[in-house]
Image (tube, rainbow, N blue to C red):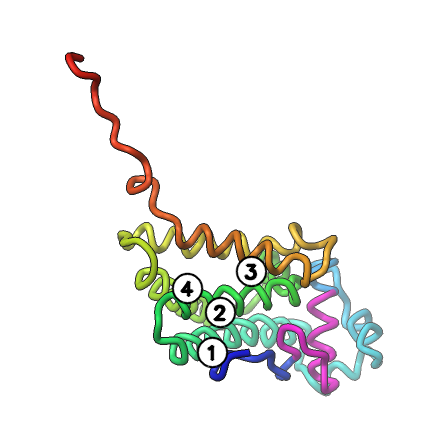
């Protein structure tokens, strides 16, 4: 890993890391259960059983099941934004920055696909203030990507940059489905190549030849 790049973290078990404390283990197991059964379909007792504690013991670490979901989704949003900003700071060359961002998010998406599923399905179950916080963090993370895309590759309009960023996230965040039956080692190079190719391609308007009427045509 290059100096200055973002390593996997040990707070609440970041991508690729094993849970190191009981609280983090509860978060990891809860995310898997929420992804499989949904927030409302998962019980505190079920989370406790998966984490190796009694259901009531969960309340020593979290005020409620809702509080657990808040920490889960706010935590991963903060992790992604902090990591993205650090990569932007440590990779001044635009192409290198974009490469590092792709590798960072692909690593997250392949090692924690359950968090993508929880975000998609259960964001609405957050309290209003927490949901606004998650949305603000996500917007800021997208802006890190938009800046990197705008600085590298062909010149694009603001709308084209935004579309490219969200299309990249669509590819990378497909892992709960696209990579469910393979390993991260197999999926990572395929997904990375697809995202990088999409981001660095010319726009349709630039790539398409201009049609001209045949000589003598009306």
Residue 17 lies in what quarter of the image? bottom right
Task: Tell me where the magenta segment starts and ends, as one range.
Answer: 13-32
* Structural crowding at the residue carrying mark 2, measured as other residues with C-alpha within 10 Å and reported as few (<14), some (14–19) or many (≥20): many
Question: Helix, strand or loop at disc 1?
Answer: helix
Question: Helix, strand or loop at disc 3?
Answer: helix
Q: Residue at coordinates 53% horizontally, 55% vertically from top-left? A: 193
State the separation of the CA atoms marked 1 and 3: 24 Å
Residue 181, percent from left and from top: 74, 53
Residue 189, percent from left and from top: 60, 58
User: Where, quadrant-wise, is the N terminus in this rendering?
Assistant: bottom right
Residue 47, percent from left and from top: 78, 72
Q: Is residue 33 magenta?
A: no
User: Label 4: which residue?
Assistant: 142
Counting residues from the N terminus, which is met first, the one under dot 2 or under dot 3? 3
User: Label 1: which residue?
Assistant: 82
Counting residues from the N terminus, which is met first, the one under dot 2 or under dot 1? 1
Cβ–Cβ below 8 Å for labels 2 and 3?
no
Which label sits in the foreground, 2 or 1?
Answer: 1
């Amino acid at each position: 890993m290059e100096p200055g790049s973002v390593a996997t973290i040990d707070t609440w078990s970041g991508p690729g890391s094993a849970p190191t404390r009981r609280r983090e283990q509860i978060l990891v197991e809860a995310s898997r259960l929420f992804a499989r059964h949904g927030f409302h379909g998962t019980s505190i007792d079920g989370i406790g059983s998966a984490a190796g504690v009694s259901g009531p013991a969960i309340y020593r670490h979290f005020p409620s099941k809702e509080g657990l979901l808040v920490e889960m989704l706010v935590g991963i949003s903060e992790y992604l934004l902090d990591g993205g900003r650090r990569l932007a700071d440590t990779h001044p060359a635009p192409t290198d920055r974009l490469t590092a961002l792709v590798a960072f998010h692909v690593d997250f998406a392949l090692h924690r696909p359950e968090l993508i599923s929880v975000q998609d399905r259960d964001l609405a179950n957050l309290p209003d203030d927490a949901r606004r916080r998650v949305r603000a963090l996500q917007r800021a993370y997208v802006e890190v990507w938009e800046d990197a895309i705008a600085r590298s590759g062909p010149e694009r309009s603001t709308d084209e940059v935004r579309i490219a960023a969200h299309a990249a996230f669509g590819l990378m965040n497909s892992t709960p489905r696209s990579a469910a039956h393979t390993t991260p080692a197999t999926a990572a190079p395929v997904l990375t190549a697809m995202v990088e190719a999409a981001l660095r391609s010319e726009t349709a308007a630039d790539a398409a030849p201009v049609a001209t009427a045949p000589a003598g045509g009306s």
